[in-house]
Amino acid sequence: MLDAVVVGAGPNGLTAAVELARRGFSVAVFEARDSVGGGARTEELTLPGFRHDPCSAAHPLGINSPAFRAMPLDRYGLEWLHPDLPMAHPFTDGTAAVLSRSVAETAASFGPRDAGPYRRLVEPFLAKWDTLARDFMSLPLTALPRDPVTLARFGLAGLPPATWLMRRFKDERARTLFSGLVAHVMAPLDGFATGAIGLVFALAAHARGWPVARGGSQSISDALTAYLKDLGGTVHTDYEVKRLDDLPPARAYIFDTSPTALARIAGFGNYYEGYRYGPGVFKIDYALDGPVPWTAPEARRAGTVQIGGNTAEIDAALRAASREGRAPDKPFMITVQPGVADPGRAPEGKQVFWAYGHVPNGWTGDLTDAIERQLERFAPGFRDLVLARATAGPAELAIRNANYVGGDIGSGAASGIQLLLRPKLSLFPYTTPHPAVYICSSATPPGPGVHGMSGHNAAKAVWRRLRQEP
């Protein structure tokens, strides 16, 4: 009998398996698709030689992950590559605010009235970032906080809505960039704890940047898989699990799946019926004939570029997708240009480019024209460079990754109390009604992102129970 079986070979499932194997437990992973990866894959989606990341592409939480940092993933081929700027937010006048590794450079891009307030906001937390990140990403009840005072201060700043936190900024440049940071989790700006989201992304950039993985996000999944196999674990692909009886006998079963899928497989009925899925996304992967012609020079140096004219425009786009049930006329967009740091992703002189906008969950329309009109506002002539595009709306994204229910790449709405307590209102979110069944996907704390911490936290709950058994 195995000690543990993991269902789903995404970053969280693989991390859970590694954490258990490192502690001497026998582990096997079962994945429905023909390769590992989940939200960290790389494929030729458009033309030969153009290597795209179908989902996550830039990894501020990956390089800052306490779980990943404790593993020798560099020995297994994972190499982080950094653009000159982690992120830029261009404006229609040809200028841009930036999120730089340097707090001073970031503050200067906001203008003189907001430079001081921004430094006073982030510098106290940045000085204790590693401890704060560990405490923040390990909650709830998986570890006692190492620095409860700093964590409490962070909570005071971050638990109110982002709209409250942004009152300290006088000008639109700082507010717009910070609004974009919050929008990465598709949460309206006036939601509970949205200030914390923006702070985490900003601090992650200042601490270690927003890198890409050399060769593509698949490198993260491949490194985790290779490390797991060296530890004695096994990985089985093309193995769809429809019920628990499909799996070999084990002392514990850990699911890197949506709560909906887990309830179906384990026979939990309506146990997760209150779990809410958030807005979906409409994503386009481009093969380009050259670099994106951003008007703002800073955007040409950045790995990630946020697209939103101002705070009101960003908020309107978020509200349209999450509360009004319609696609926004001017979508807020996150774009990634991996070739700025990793030119090997495309043939010489060409570029891969990745962009998505938010749409209602399960939306069936086509956002291509709206996305490209937005890009043309900040990069005139963009359409002239398009060699090929691969579009994916909510339905296509859900086919690629079953955890993206209705196109929700966060595996659950990051709004209200569900931002912190997911998938149930419980202090033990990784456990389920079955004492041997656990959940470790992005539907559990600390939530979305390629960081493995949901898998790490779930594995900790598993090994504590297994060590108590005779």
Image (cartoon, rainbow, N blue to C red):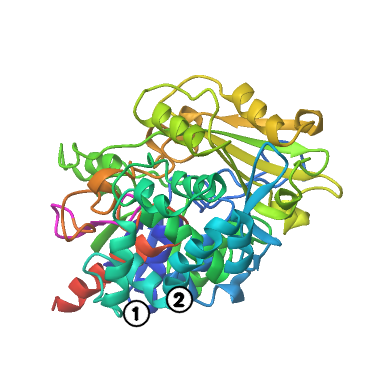
Q: Residue 302: name its quadrant.
A: bottom right
Q: Observer-nearest residue: 221 or 7?
A: 221
Q: Which contiguous range is marked in magenta? A: 432-443
Whether residue 83 is visible to the viewer of this picture, yes or no, is yes
Main secondary-structure element of the magenta-colored stretch: loop
Whether residue 9 is visible to the viewer of this picture, yes or no, is no
Q: Observer-nearest residue: 26 or 100?
A: 100
In the rendered image, residue 33, in percent from the top left (x then y), is placed at 48, 45
Determine whether 3 is above or below 174 in the image. Answer: below
In the rendered image, residue 248, in percent from the top left (x then y), is placed at 29, 57
Residue at x 53% of width, y 61% of height: 60
- Tags 1 and 2 in contact by the CB under 8 Å rule? no
Residue at x 61% of width, y 55% of height: 111
Q: Is residue 355 left or right of residue 27?
A: right
> Label 2, on which residue?
231
- Helix or strand or loop: what does disc 1 sit on? loop
Q: Is residue 301 left or right of residue 123?
A: right
Amino acid under label 2? Leu
Q: Residue 335: name its quadrant.
A: top right
Q: CA distance from mark 1 to mark 2?
A: 8 Å
In the rendered image, residue 174, in percent from the top left (x then y), is placed at 53, 51
User: Few, some or many C-alpha atoms within 10 Å of disc 2 (few <14, some 14-19, many ≥20)?
Assistant: many
Residue at x 17% of width, y 53% of height: 432
User: Few, some or many C-alpha atoms within 10 Å of disc 1 (few <14, some 14-19, many ≥20)?
Assistant: some
> Label 1, on which residue?
24
Amino acid under label 1? Gly
In the rendered image, residue 269, in percent from the top left (x then y), is placed at 15, 38
Determine whether 452 is above or below 295 in the image. Answer: below
Mark 1 or mark 2: name the one nearer the start of the chain. 1
Q: Observer-nearest residue: 237 or 291?
A: 291
